[in-house]
Image (tube, coloured by chain):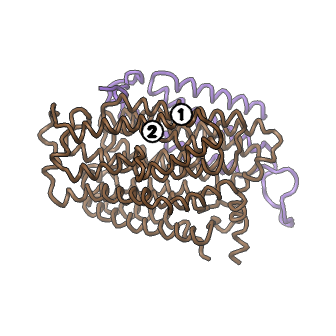
Amino acid sequence: MNSSIVLYPILWQAIISIVLMFFWQRTYLQRIVSIIGSAIGLALALVLFTMVWNNGILVVQAGNWAAPFGITMVADLFAASLVLLTHIVAFAVSIYSKETIISSRVRFGYFPIYHLLIMGLSGAFLTGDIFNLYVWFEVIIISSFVLLTLGGKHAQIEGAVKYFTLNMLASIIFLTAIALLYGVTGTLNMAELSRIVPQIENQGLIQIIAIIFFTGFGIKAGVFPLYFWLPASYHAPPAAVSAVFGGLLTKVGVYALIRIFTLIFTPDTFNSTLIMWTAALTLLSGGLGALVQKDITKVFSYLIICHIGFMIAGLSLNMEIALIGAIFYMFHDIIVKANLFLVGGLLYRINGTTKIDQMGGLLNTYPKLAVLIAIPLFSLVGIPPLSGFWPKLSLFQASFASENYLLLGFMIFASFITLVIIARLWNNVVSKPVDNAPVVSTKFRYFQTFSRYEKSAMITPIVFLSAVSLYIGFGAEHIHTIVSKIGYELMHTEGYYDAVFNTLNSQR
Amino acid sequence: MELVLAIMTGVLYAAGIYLILRRSLVKLIIGLVLLGNGINLLIFLMGGLVKGNPPIIEVDGKVLSGVFSDPVPQALILTAIVISFGLQSFAIILIKRAYQVVNTDDLDEMNTTDRIE
């Protein structure tokens, strides 16, 4: 069995990025290459996913050095499905970037850096070595710094200072935790760590290391007291960049949290209480933050924080059904959040502003678009047949089963706040007529003046992501089968360990 | 030697965090640089210090013998230094641009992105 397919999605993004660098000044060609490249990347991710689904966990040892001596890349079902979702979003955003990213940004290397970001995300999901995870995190943040600052507007630079400082601090905290963990266990391989860590005598030290990991990943994921960089920076870059950030970047932090707290650490009572309260307060503060914001992208930024709370809540309950709910929520959230930021960019083009109270009248001007944007908006709330409903069902069920009514209350409250926000947004943007139209410069190009071709390039990705959302909602039993298998794999780590340590035998 | 390195790590962390909490942009970057150096020392320290016994197998031997120094932390530090070098050079360009665009180096005045209008 050829398991080197694990590396193809990563390598392919690096190859596109290098190819794009040869066409530095030819912006039109770069746009086309990026779309084709992302389509092929999506196909590779799909192949990886089907192979992992059919054959179980795939493992590659770098340089054929047997684990734990070399760097291990592991594609279990969790990693493979997240790589697939990453590539779905990347494909949609590539198409969206074609018309919305202006040529001066492209000439400063927008597309090569964008593909390096996707490479970093895929690498972070697939690695099985904790120091290698740090390296992929650095690939992600350095690419995101460039994408965030490209263009050099006031809000971008100011947001970037905050984004940079806190993300670099998070990396330093993460690296501190790695150093301490290496000092205690003497290994970096995640599969081997899962065996050594429970045998360490000084469990107090292990729990402290777990807290340091939680802080580092918590900053990246945007949990309660550590999220302030997120709403300060996510609204600044163009909508295409915000979509990738909002859909995927915080989810890498959540992925890392779920991975280390299922595979390596088992939280003690204090730590699980800490994680539970973090989740509850994240739900609360994100929801209340979104309630007072008047800028559409800032509302979406706070909603990211609010919904990160659901995933952390699933993690804190520490049982299989809760994990299933959290991972299902993550799948739904990646697609919907990316889609919402694309919708935000579209509304900006239609109305000439991002202020919610200055928008309006979409039902009269573009009734079909109003129906289209209803899909991501109401999926986010979780109206029953749509995708947000099913993971909440599992999460609520888990909190009933563990009799954690406090967390249940916070989750229901956050769902209601989301409903209020989306209802108000719908009322302002779609139903009511425009009463105070914004003053925009004469150079601003309204959506109305776009050619048919340009319009379709902006709407196709939204249609595509909405279709994926609808599939997650209406094909929930398929997703649930996948997620249940992931939940089983995460709770029974022997499979992961055996896969990592037996690869060379099976290849011979 | 361990004690000296441990104290050095502590001093670098403390100084780094103190500088991050100041209001000046330049001090912020210096703080991050100090933290980056502190973490490198910490990795080195956690690998265990062994003097004068490199991890090299003798010509007639098959395995390493005796107490030898661990090569992995040194590889990790090398990677971490390269990464933090890249990030720090980006940071210096960023604060230069930030000073030009926002026209201040006071972090407390950089609050326009947090306002609700």
Q: Where is residue A472, by image quadrant?
A: bottom left
Pick whichever, A169 or A99, lies toward us.
A99
Q: Quadrant of the N terminus of chain A?
A: bottom right
- Seen in the image, is A233 located left or right of residue A30? right
Circle on res. A409: 1
Q: Residues within 10 Å of mark 2 (few under 14, many from 20)?
A: many
Q: Which residue is mark 2?
A: A415
**Left or right: A168 in relation to B13:** left
Q: Is residue B93 visible?
A: no
Residue A276, numbered label: none
Name the subunit of mark 2.
A
Which image quarter is the C terminus of chain A in? bottom right
**Chain letter corresponding to the colour purple:** B
Residue A95, image x, y percentages: 31, 59
Sequence-wise, which precedes: disc 2 or disc 1? 1
What hue does chain A carry in this figure?
Answer: brown
- Chain under label 1? A
Which residue occupies 58% across, 48% down? A256
Task: Find residue A302 and report its horizontal and vertical position in percent.
Answer: 41, 36
